[in-house]
Structure formats: structure tokens, C-alpha cells
Amino acid sequence: MNIEEANRTAVERMTAARPRLTGIAQAREVIPGMRDGLLLHAGPPIEWARMSGPLRGAVIGALIFEGLAHDEAGAVALVERGEVAFEPCHHHGAVGPMAGVISPSMKVYVVEDSTHGLRTFSNLNEGYGKVLRYGAFSDEVIAKLRWMNLTLAPILARAVDLLGGIDLRALIAEALHMGDEGHNRNKAGSLLFLKLLAPAIAGVAPHSKIQEEVLAFLGGNPLSVLNPVMAACKAMADAAHGVEGSTIVSAMARNGTDFGIRVSGLGDRWFTAPAQVPDGLYFPGFSSADANPDIGDSTITETAGLGAFAMAAAPAIVTFIGGTPQDAVNATLEMYEITAGEHPQFTIPALGFRGSPVGIDLRKVVELGITPRVNTGIAHRQAGVGQVGAGLVRPPMEIFEQALVAYAERYLDDGGG
Amino acid sequence: MNIEEANRTAVERMTAARPRLTGIAQAREVIPGMRDGLLLHAGPPIEWARMSGPLRGAVIGALIFEGLAHDEAGAVALVERGEVAFEPCHHHGAVGPMAGVISPSMKVYVVEDSTHGLRTFSNLNEGYGKVLRYGAFSDEVIAKLRWMNLTLAPILARAVDLLGGIDLRALIAEALHMGDEGHNRNKAGSLLFLKLLAPAIAGVAPHSKIQEEVLAFLGGNPLSVLNPVMAACKAMADAAHGVEGSTIVSAMARNGTDFGIRVSGLGDRWFTAPAQVPDGLYFPGFSSADANPDIGDSTITETAGLGAFAMAAAPAIVTFIGGTPQDAVNATLEMYEITAGEHPQFTIPALGFRGSPVGIDLRKVVELGITPRVNTGIAHRQAGVGQVGAGLVRPPMEIFEQALVAYAERYLDDGGG
């Protein structure tokens, strides 16, 4: 077994994936293993007792949305009676930003990579403000989720059908030339998504009032495309997973309590440690004292060479998360040190169209003492509040060290390597 | 009279302008001095005998579009009988890309700057391919112009009304943070334009088939917003025009034969010299031997601090016009040397959000021997062909020298300065 060769294979599989958005459907109908009474969540596995405020808030909201509880107390009682099961999105081919809660009735994006025959999923993006993914669950939050499920999703589903799908890899590549990094900044990508969908929406929406609502909602949300992009990154990362002997990181995810990673050559085991509070810019009236530790599956973008890894493509992002444009370039340059490849499709104009750094090599992280950079939103630590800022975070070094020990135990004891 | 102070005033007026798109109307109804039998064209004044191929082609197409001729021979005969008058767009508060031909029946964008009480105009953008502005006049060109006039324009007009206008300065500022330079690259700006218009179009279009057509046309044309942006730049530049003693260039424009400039403190006089053939990238099968000399009013964008002046905002443009991303940064840095100010709204992320170089100072151009840089499309030299490439060009130094001599004659002889 040759590690370099295994890693080359993993990175080639990751970058050869060509995920397309092919549909929008109800979670229980398309997500493998989804069932009534099950809620999916961001990050590695976690039980209710250890869940942070925003994840608890999203769980409460999802139970109200499902009609299983009328209010917070009812939802908590249901959970405490053991009537709700929790499993990571990642165990079901899915990803969700921030709390990442997906319940059986929610509509989800379906993404397919025909190169490797993989299907992945993500929920719909709610926009900014009071939203479930940041742990808010007020009536307006639930009402918006219902509108998204009953009005938006069926129209999107018909529009995507009419278009015969959307090539997400091409969309991401184009957005990187328009100042996006694909994680915190998806402004251009969301407009490209709108551009593709708008004529089809006009064709399928039942009447002009609803067309106006849908076009205004999609166009007004600079994160509209984040969730399909995350599902695309999940498809790319999953394509790289399971390569015997590979030290490439195939998932990074946080549940608001723990930061976890998976490694291509180490099966489905998570390596976890407590998640950190991000460094960043806070909305007026909030500070790091209000911040929950890092949360969300959106680190799948960094896993696939986007987000903080592609910061050099997005100098304007520094107005949102702090720092200077030179910091943005430096962030990408640093990530080349811990990655095994450069993405052939995701290129960065400001670096002379160099491919973004892709395929985090566990060994390099530990040897160089450089953990991956992550761009992120910041949730309030209490359930029901919502977003308080955005910033930068790094996973704890400890999880990479754990993984390297596990790798040695798995591979090196039998004389390989 | 203090030159520095005059120039400060001119640049302050240029950057204080806040042009808004307020309507779409027929040229003969809104453009001052527009009348039947008159065609407006790009650049400084020119008579038929000296017009280049693409401008002649656009004149022929416009006469067919107006129903004044059936074909090329009929159009040429009409012109040669002296029945068509030609005047620059610039003499009527208007601007048009490439040939820039505006005929009385064409629908035009109306842009207003309430700060200085100015109104400016531009025609609608036809997209890429066989188009009038590059001198093509085949049946499909005329058919598209008719569709734009009869279908697209009335819907845009109602949509803009419904929105209460569009703040073009804000749109340009946002697009510069998304990889546009506002002249050759208006990809992000056109998507922002679509985003604002789409819900309103859904509200006003008579039925869904037409909505689909309009949304697909606007979304499919990465230059959709170029013409309103040009009219906005014309409003900014006109606000800076007519400041006694100022050496700031208030217009740069080419008619395909001559490159002309106007200067704020030198009234309505044009300083002209033969236009150059741009350096650039050619479409397959074409070379510089096919290229017409530089043509179009779109240099109004450079006059207002965009286009080649804002190249550092648009590293991806080099795939379209040649060069490296570092050349793009260097282009902007060079333009700071010949400008009097930095734009407070138009900022460039990659330069640490420094304002784009704005207000070309005639004196600096001549003293430093640095002519303004211009990004441009390249038209075939023959009427009826169309675009053959895109590239970079500079105006002849001679016109700045002429203007400086005129300035000396006008101001310095009476002991001022």
C-alpha cells in the first residue's frame, strides 16, 4: 500500500466528481434510512443531553414543523420521553448548514454525481434573519418553512425538471471567478442559480403573484445556492471516501458541541473533540460571549477545496468576516501546504488561475501544525435567538492527531506504508 | 483661477452624481433634439464618407429598422441623397456601445441624476453574436431589434416603474466586488440587474411565455446592464463637464475612424485623431487584419473610473482580453498616475478597497506620457460582419496634446493658472 498513490486516487475521485442538481423531493421519500421520528442534524453523532442551544432550538422547531409538538415544552417532553431519534446528516448522504436539522417532511435538494453513482441531499436555504438553522423556532420561522415546503419547493422541483438539472460544478467554478468562495459568500453563485431557474420558474409557477414571491425570495437571498453547493461538495467528498490507505480528510463537520472529521482510509469512524468559538465580526449588540461553539456541516465546502480554502477568490468577503484582502490570499496559500492537490475546475483568478487547494492530508496537518481554515456563521449559544455574527475558525488539532494514531494502528502495524 | 481647485470640483461633481435608471421610452419622445431623419452615432462627429464599415453597417440596419429602406442599397441611396442627418450621441445626452447608432423609434434607457438634475440615455443591449452595434444588419438582427422594441422594452419599462427606478451607482459598486470592471465584464452587474427586475417582470409581463423569453434574454446576456451603466457614466461625466479651468477629461469616444475627447474646462469642442486598432484576442478565424479601428461610446466607463481603470477588480477578465491577473492590477495602478481622484463609491477589494482611479487629468497624461487604458470589443472592419474579438487600446497621445494647447490658449494667455 502506497500512501501517496492512495491519496492521488482519493483527490482524483474528489475532483472528477461532477455533481448535478437533479431534483427537489421530500426527505422521507429520497434520503436513505430517513423515517418518521428521526431527525438528522449537522456534525458527528450527539445525544440530546450534550446538544448546544442552537441545535436544540432547531430540533424544537423541526418537531413543531412536523406537527409532533405544539411548542417548546411539548417538543422537549417528546425528546425526553425518548420518542425522537437523532442521527447525523452525514450518515444519510446529506448535509445541512449550521444546526443542519432535516426532518422527514422537509423538502430537500437531490444532487447526483453520475461519475461515481452517488446521490446526496441538502435542505432548502431560509435566508438570513430568524431561521431554524441558527436555532430560532418562532411562529414566523415555522411559517417560512411551511411556505418553502408547500410553495417554493414544488416550483423549484418543476423548474429543475424543466431544465433537466443544473451542473453545480460548472456553477461553482463560475462563481469563484465572480468573488465567491462558496461557503460564507455565495452571492454570485446564488445569482447564477437564479439566472438559470428564473425562465423555468416563469414557465411552471401557477400564477404571477407566486412567481414574484419565488423570484424575490431566491434573488433576495445571497445564500440561496449554499445548500445545493454543500450537497455537491458532499458528493465530491464522498467520492474520495473509502480509498484504502488514504490519509485524505473526507468530511469535516460540527454539531455545535464537537468538531468531527472522517478520513478516506479509516472507514466511517469520526474523530472528535470540543468545537471552538469562531473569531469574527459580531452584529451590533452581540459579542463572543454570546457565541455558540462552531456548528454545521458547511465545512464540507472546505473539505472539497472551497470556503476558506478558496478565500483568495473572494477578497470582498473580508468586510463580512474581518481581515484584509491580503489575509484572504494568505489563507489560500497556507492551505496549499496541507493539501494533496489543486482543483482542476475550481480556479482562482487572482492567483493566476491556480486551482484551489483540495484534499486535506492528515499527515501534513499534523506534521506542519497547520489545521484547516474554516469560514463560518456564528450562532447565539441559546436556543431560539439566531445568528450573531460570522468569522473564522479552525478545528482542534487533537482530532487530526487521533486520526493519525488510528491510521498507524490500522495500517502500519501490519508492515504496510 | 486655480486648476487644482477646478479639478477637485469636477471630480467631486463626477463622484457625487447618483444616477438612477428611471424609465425606458422611445428615443424620439425623450432624447432632446431627436427627430425623424436623424441618426445618433458613437464618438465625435463624422460624415458618411469617412465612416468605417461597422458604423455604416449599423446605419444601414437602423434605416431598415425604421422602415426607411428595404435593404443595403436602398439605405445607402437614402444617405447619399442627403436625407439622413448624423450627430453624435454625446451631443444629445446619450451614449451607445460600439457603432452606438440610435434611431428615433428605438427604445432607450432613461437615467437621471437628481444631484445635478441631468438626464442621460442609452439604447438596449442586443447580446453577443450578430448585432447592429457591431455593424451587422441581416434579417435576424433587425428581427431581434423589433422584438426588443416591441416586447422587451415595454415590459422593462413597466418593471422599472413598479420598482420606482434602480440605483445604478449602488449596482456598479456591488458589481465591482463581484469581479466586474463595468465595461467589457458586466457579468455580475447584469445578474444584479436581473435579480432586481425578475420579480417585477413576473408581475407585469402579460403571460408566462413572454416572461420566460424576457428572463432568458436578460439572464443569458452578460452585457445586459452595460448600456444603463454607460448612461450612468455619461451622467457622472456630464456632471463634471463645464467646470471653468478644469483639465479633467469629461468624455472619451470613438466613431470607428476617430478617437475624440472633451475636456471639462474647454466647452463642447472635440479633440480628435485617428483611432487605433486594439490589441487583443481574436475569435477563431479572425486576426488584427480583420479589425476595425476602435469604436464606441463605451469609453465613457473609463472616463468615470470603470473599465480598464477598474481592471484590478476583475482579474478573470484576462481570459477574455489577454494578459495576466497581475497585468490587471498593474493597469489600475498605472491609471492612478493620470487621475485626480479616487472614487468614494467604486472600491476595489483586491487593492484593500481603494477607490478606483477617477478623473483623467489632461496635464498628467501629457506630462507622464501615459494615455488612458481602454477595454473594448473589436468589430470587423467590413459592414455586416460583427464582432471578431476583444482587447485593449489607448487613445492617441496627440488628442491630449491638442487639448493642452487649447487649454493654454484659452486660459493661460490671460494670466490665469
Image (tube, coloured by chain):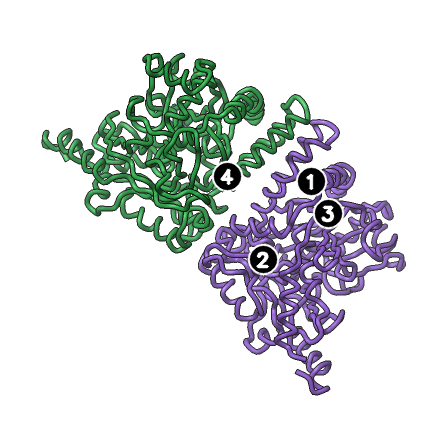
Chain colours: A green, B purple
N-term-proximal mark, 2 vs 1: 1
For disc 1, the neighbor class at 10 Å (few under 14, some 14 to 19, many from 20) is few
Q: Say which of marks 2 and 3 sits in front.
A: 3
Residue under the point 68% across and 23% down: A207
The residue labelled by disc 3 is: B22
- The residue carrying mark 4 is A189
Left or right? Give the position of A346 relative to A207: left
Quarter residue A343 falls in: top left
Tell me which residue sits at (55%, 64%) in the image.
Answer: B342
SS at mark 3? strand
Residue type, label 2: Gly
Judging by the rendered image, the residue that carries numbered circle 1 is: B163
Q: Which mark is residue B136?
A: none
Q: Are marks 2 and 3 on the same chain?
A: yes
Under tag 4, what secondary structure? helix
Same chain under badges 3 and 4? The reply is no
Name the residue tied to disc 2: B307
Say which label, 1 or 3, has the lower sequence index: 3
First in residue order: circle 2 vs circle 3: 3
Q: Quadrant of residue A261?
A: top left
Instruction: Name the residue at 79% across, 45% down.
Output: B25
The vertical placement of A135 against B379, above or below, is above
Q: How far, Cα to Cα, is label 3 from label 4? A: 28 Å
Amino acid type of the residue that numbered disc 4 sits on in the rendered structure: Gly
Q: Label 2 to label 1, Cα distance in Å?
A: 28 Å
Task: Say which element carries label 1.
Answer: helix
Question: Which of the pair A401/B279 is nearer the observer?
Answer: A401
Q: Residues within 10 Å of mark 3 (few under 14, many from 20)?
A: many
Q: Is residue B379 left or right of residue A298?
A: right
